[in-house]
Image (cartoon, rainbow, N blue to C red):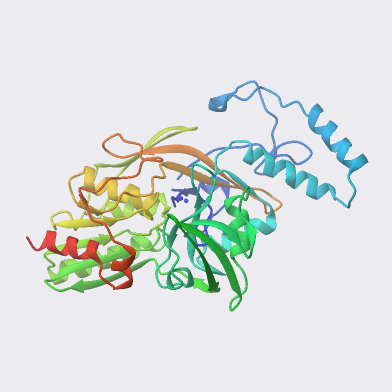
Amino acid sequence: MVFKQKSVASTDAAPINPTEVARKRRFAKIGLTVMIALAIFSLGVNVGNGRVRFGAHTGRTGLSAQLDYTTVNDIYAAIRQNYNGKLTEAQMLDGLKHGLAEATNDPYTQYFTAAEAKKFNEELNNSFSGIGAELGQDADKNIIVIAPIKGFPAEKAGLQAQDIIVSINGKSTQGMSVDEAVSVVRGPKGTDVKLGIVRGADSLTLTITRDNIQLPSVTTKTLDGNIGYLQISSFSSDTAQLVQKAADGFKSQNVKGIIVDLRNDPGGLLDAAVDVSSEWVPQGKLVVEERGTSGDDKHFASGKSELAAIPTVVLVNSGSASAAEITAGALHDNKRATIIGEKSYGKGVVQQLVNFPDGSQLKVTVASWFRPNGQNINHKGITPDQIVKLTADDAKANNDTQLTAAEAFLNK
């Protein structure tokens, strides 16, 4: 996911801490990058702290100048008079708000009630209880695993990127939104969740014990042959600072090469992706361009590009999304890195969080992003320069063929 705060999808784990709309924080994801003012029902339409009505300008959405509530009121009246059960006006209003977001048919545009927003923010703050996996939707609206997060219950139980989750605790996921699936998968530490999985031609059931998830953003080490290894698990508020620290360490060690491991990185903050890329990309060079509701916005490298002269390999796979793809594309297109691994996830859109006075939130897609070479990778992904598969058998045998290929490339 890419958040613009400047976040691939709803997540079981996500890397951002949203602030007020006025500060224009955005999602980049998968991850994890955006900006908009969007209308929501609340006995009218509210944006931020002020009441807004749809005006004459249709904007890029093509929406009419005014929204006719007549048929909505007809349905409300019919439910009020005929429904055999108890309902509250708050439930009905929340349903309207969810419906507005869902009407976009965009899996990344979602409305959160105050309670849902609280859970979402727990994810963004990297502190929640769950299994540790990034979930998304494929073209057929199946709930899929974008990436299990290294070291947490999902990975330990054998969940893999691109697994299709067909049931959760025996309940079919057909027609279930990503957020609904995430809500069911999460739960108190120590409790179990049972996932029905389709993996290729195989069907299996995994029982995973939930745990507290506290995501590390960056890990580093020095490999044999004096090769620096930098793994980014998500692009969060501390990522740029940690990568800067790693860069200083690599420079002092005079490493002969660097491996940037972005495999199973669901994305995160756009600003973090730009700052990380700036460790390699020379100042003033293009990192990424947004094209969206508020116009076009180009993001250029800033900083000292300390690592620009050090041969670098970026590792990606099908779990590399959004901000991870921005970084991989920026380094590659600026001729600062070779990409090795498997084709990335392909999330080339950006979301922004819009906060409302009652604690609710809207996560809305506001832009598409483009690599320095002009490509938008949405639903396409980034194809590596050197394709290296990592099979399930290799993974079980702890035989990291992709990392080995990266080391061999740097040792030439």
Nearer to me, 397 or 234: 397
In the picture, the quarter occupied by the C terminus is bottom left
> Could you tell me which residue is drawn at 50 percent across and 66 percent down?
126
Position of residue 380 in the picture relative to residue 210 (left or right): left
> Could you tell me which residue is drawn at 54 percent across and 72 percent down?
207
Task: Pick out the residue farthest to the front.
Answer: 201
Position of residue 107 in the picture relative to residue 369 (left or right): right
Nearer to me, 408 or 226: 408
- Quarter location, residue 53: top right
- In this rendering, is residue 120 above or below 43? below
Q: x%, y% of residue 327?
A: 31, 50
- Quarter location, residue 160: bottom left
- In this rendering, is residue 379 above or below 217? above
> Could you tell me which residue is drawn at 28 percent across and 70 percent down?
220
Q: x%, y% of residue 85?
A: 89, 51
Q: x%, y% of residue 64?
A: 65, 22
Task: Pick out the residue farthest to the bottom.
Answer: 190
- What count of labels does the image hold? 0
Position of residue 316 in the picture relative to residue 99 (left or right): left
Q: x%, y% of residue 91?
A: 79, 49
Whether residue 328 is visible, yes or no, is yes
- In this rendering, is residue 282 above or below 134? above
